[in-house]
Amino acid sequence: MTSPWELLTLTNFSPQQWRGSSYLYRLVGIWQSWRSSSYLMQWDQAIGTALLAILLSLSPFISTALVGVLLSAIALYWLLLTLSDVGKPSITPIHILALLYWAIATVATAFSPVRAAALEGWRNTSLFLLLFALAAQIFRNRHYRNIIWTVFLLVALIVSTYGVYQSIHGAPPLATWNDPASPMAKNIRVYSYLNNPNLLAGYLLPAIAMSAAAFFAWRRPLPKLLALLMTLVNAICLYFTDSRGGWIGFLILFTTFVVLLYTAYNSLLPRFWRVWLIPLVFGSLLTLLVLGFLFVEPLRLRISSIFIGREDSSNNFRINVWLAVLNMIRDRPILGIGPGHATFNKIYPLYMQAKFSALGAYSIYLETALELGVIGLLSFLWLVLVTFWAAFRQIAKSGNFWLIGAVAGLAGLLGHGFVDTVWYRPEIHVLWWLLVAYVASQYPSINAASSHEPSLFDHRDV
């Protein structure tokens, strides 16, 4: 008998049953004959890997419009692959819930009070979900997914290194990131190539998680040393962003990574470490935080500002935006105002308090509820739940270090997203859906059917 938890997490989901009843799925493979005779399509996964690698290589350095062009190319390539597929691509519950999320966004667009603006947001949502679909296929090949993650980590190292350089040599503020009346008004907040310290912090969270995973996954000394360097530089750069949301995300990321790593491998540890490893790790972290709070004045001031409410200008600004957004949600609770930044810009001025214009809801949960209504928020949370549950099951089975990093990165972004909406910027949204795609590629029900995941000690260097 299926339990309520199994129903909620779609643990016993049968893709064969869904395929048989889906009219949309019958389009898969209608161009099979062309693909079998095409020389270029013999390199289908290599081409997909190259597209993803180009996107990751350029996204921190180019405009949003150019990122959109690359995402469009990836979407068209996924469509070409799907229509010419000679097999039947694996479908997981994560795919189904991503499709549900897209369907709700489509309905919300149709009923939006500013439909033209919502169509732009719907297009962007569609592009990100097609990125997810292609990446979930590519990541099933261990060689190609190692290439993709290595490209990302090397690019992130360039980004974080420049951020550390800014902290040493100075960086002119591009906006009023600090309260002019604050003791930290002249403090340098680094932004690297992303031109926004909060955006940089969000970008670095997946980089920290995956570079930490690389430290455990890469077996030879030099790659391990490189992974350790990446983790340290990324973490140092995150500190210099002075992003309180980023710091919160890091604590959640760190906790998730350590707990998952311990859960997967504690049986291999001596008895002393099985008992004391977690208390020692978190005790040391707490000690460092306390010492930093006591003796590092910028850190103490920045942390203290989290708890002083409206006395901090940034807190006061966010509180006023949140109150306005709650009023917007109250007026359109079911399907929201429609997806996208443009819809927010059209509707928010009707609700904003004087002098508190905003670019977003400053919380991904409020933003999702605003754009897609309560139905959209519930579908998003359902997707997150199923993604995490699938990852936990596979980690328990294989001890996959990259999967531990992916889950930790997702958790960090969700934590950061409580108080910011940089998650919606393409530099970070691309990483979010790539992490989700990696979890989907390792889904337990398809893992045995694809090229098998390496055993516990078989994580090889790239």
Image (cartoon, rainbow, N blue to C red):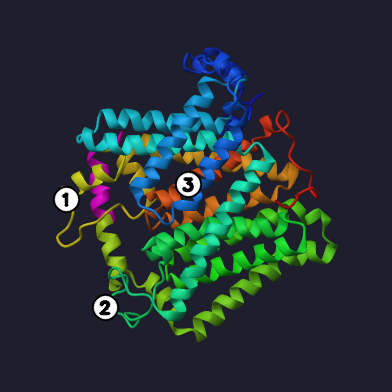
Name the quadrant of the N terminus.
top right
- The type of residue carrying mark 1 is Pro
Residue 362 drawn at (x, y percent)? 33, 55
Q: Nearer the viewer, mark 3 or mark 2?
A: 3
Q: Secondary structure at mark 3?
A: helix
Residue labelled with disc 1? 349
What's the residue at 50%, 46% (across, down)? 54
Q: Is residue 446 visible?
A: yes
Q: Is residue 449 magenta?
A: no
Residue labelled with disc 3? 55
State the image quarter where residue 118 is shown: top left
Q: Earlier in the sequence, mark 3 or mark 2?
A: 3
- The type of residue carrying mark 2 is Pro
Would you call the spot at circle 1 few (<14 residues within 10 Å), some (14-19), or many (20 or more)?
Answer: some
**What label does residue 168 carry, if any?**
none
* Residue 336 position (above or below residue 86): below
Residue positioned most to the right = 270
Q: Are marks 2 and 1 in contact (CB under 8 Å)?
A: no
* Residue 393 position (above or below residue 246): above
